[in-house]
Image (spheres, rainbow, N blue to C red):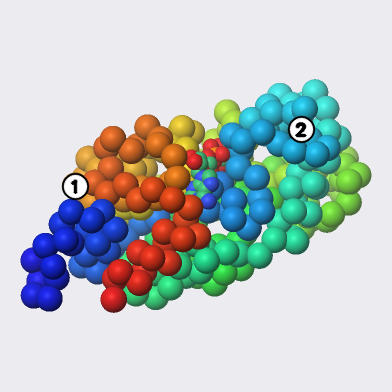
């Protein structure tokens, strides 16, 4: 233990996590919908409200749903885009911007498609599940436009097929570069943080397991337990908008 660090550092998970982060050369952070919850964007596994209350998010985010009713799926994403445009990054996002400046090698992998990490100022962000702000041709996969807020289903100007949001749906492949870069970063990091994710959706959830196997110190930030909780070295219970700024403070 470095001089000046009390023995409390070993029993308090926040202090232990901060100590590991301070020493780390390479840090990977994986974020999920929970980090944007405090910006007012609903997570995937909580019940939806208002117009979309009778739909299950996980049933709209599939190629099958889009094939059945492309307009319905497009309208749901148009609604999510509006929420995102009106939202602001919260203290949890800003704490990760600060962390990027303090660590020699920092990789932020996000399952979120909302672009809030970039808006908060993180420079290097791997978008594991794509981006809400791109529109692709549903037949050819090429980008056809930056997403517009229009409720009307767009059409590909080349082939006429319906446009779709540039996100990865259940059952679809993760973009190859995102998959490879995050897997190698997870295998090589000293500290891996899992923030605001239910750790249920693979392959993203497998990144923490790969990091653990390679000997990294694993920190979980979540108000609720997940399948990762019992494997993590430090579990920081609470909303990321409170826990992450406290963790950064404890690093000083
Ligand atoms: P989920 O909706 O599955 O989980 C959100 C997690 O955030 C839960 O574990 C909550 O306990 C936690 N949470 C809630 N409020 C929080 C807060 N204020 N601070 C920190 N954590 C909080 O979201 P993801 O794990 O991101 O994929 O879901 C993974 C993927 O499944 C998504 O990217 C999406 C989804 O369906 C696709 O669309 C392919």
Residue 215: image tag:
1
Q: Is mark 2 within 8 Å of ligand 1?
A: no
In the picture, measured across the screen, residue 36 lies left or right of residue 164, that is left
Q: Please state, as top left, top right, bottom left or bottom right, where the N terminus lies in the image.
A: bottom left
Total numbered labels placed on residues in the image: 2
- Residue sitting nearer the eye, 240 or 188: 240
Q: x, y percentage for residue 190?
A: 24, 57
Q: Quadrant of residue 169?
A: top right
- Residue sitting nearer the eye, 118 or 44: 44
Q: Earlier in the sequence, mark 2 or mark 1?
A: 2
> From where the camera sits, is residue 213 visible?
yes
Assign a secondary structure to mark 2: loop
**Residues at badges 2 and 1 in contact (C-beta under 8 Å)?**
no
Q: Quadrant of residue 5?
A: bottom left
Residue beneath the point at 29% across and 71% down: 251
User: Is residue 65 depicted above or below 140 in this figure?
Assistant: above
Residue beneath the point at 35% across and 51% down: 236
Residue beneath the point at 59% across and 34% down: 45
In the picture, measured across the screen, residue 140 lies left or right of residue 98, that is right
Q: x, y percentage for residue 10?
A: 15, 57
Instruction: Check disc 2: other Cα within 10 Å, few if <14, some if 14-19, many if 20+.
Output: few
Q: Quadrant of residue 102?
A: bottom left
Of labels 2 and 1, the one closer to you: 2
Residue beneath the point at 91% across and 44% down: 152
- Which residue is label 2 attached to? 53
User: Is residue 119 depicted above or below 164 in this figure?
Assistant: below
Assign a secondary structure to mark 1: loop
Q: Please state, as top left, top right, bottom left or bottom right, where the C terminus lies in the image.
A: bottom left
> From where the camera sits, is residue 118 visible?
no
Q: x, y percentage for residue 192?
A: 32, 52
């Amino acid at each position: 233990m470095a001089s000046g660090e009390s023995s409390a550092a070993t029993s308090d998970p926040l202090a232990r996590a901060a100590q590991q982060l301070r020493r780390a050369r390479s840090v990977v952070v994986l974020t999920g919908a929970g980090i944007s919850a405090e910006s007012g964007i609903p997570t995937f596994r909580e019940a939806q409200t208002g117009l979309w209350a009778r739909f299950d998010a996980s049933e709209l985010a599939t190629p099958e749903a889009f094939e059945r009713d492309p307009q319905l799926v497009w309208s749901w994403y148009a609604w999510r885009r509006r929420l995102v445009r009106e939202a602001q990054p919260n203290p949890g996002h800003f704490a990760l911007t600060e962390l990027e400046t303090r660590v020699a090698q920092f990789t932020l992998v996000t399952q979120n498609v909302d672009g809030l990490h970039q808006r908060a100022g993180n420079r290097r962000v791997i978008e594991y599940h794509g981006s809400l702000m791109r529109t692709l041709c549903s037949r050819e996969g090429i980008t056809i436009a930056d997403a517009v807020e229009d409720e009307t289903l767009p059409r590909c100007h080349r082939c006429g097929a319906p446009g779709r949001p540039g996100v990865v749906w259940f059952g679809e492949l993760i973009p190859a570069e995102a998959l490879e870069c995050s897997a190698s970063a997870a295998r090589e990091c000293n500290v891996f943080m899992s923030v605001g994710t239910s750790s249920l959706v693979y392959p993203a959830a497998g990144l923490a397991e790969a990091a653990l196997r390679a000997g990294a110190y694993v920190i979980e930030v979540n108000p609720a337990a997940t399948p990762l909780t019992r494997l993590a070295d430090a579990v920081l219970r609470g909303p990321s908008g409170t826990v992450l700024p406290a963790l950064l403070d404890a690093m000083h």
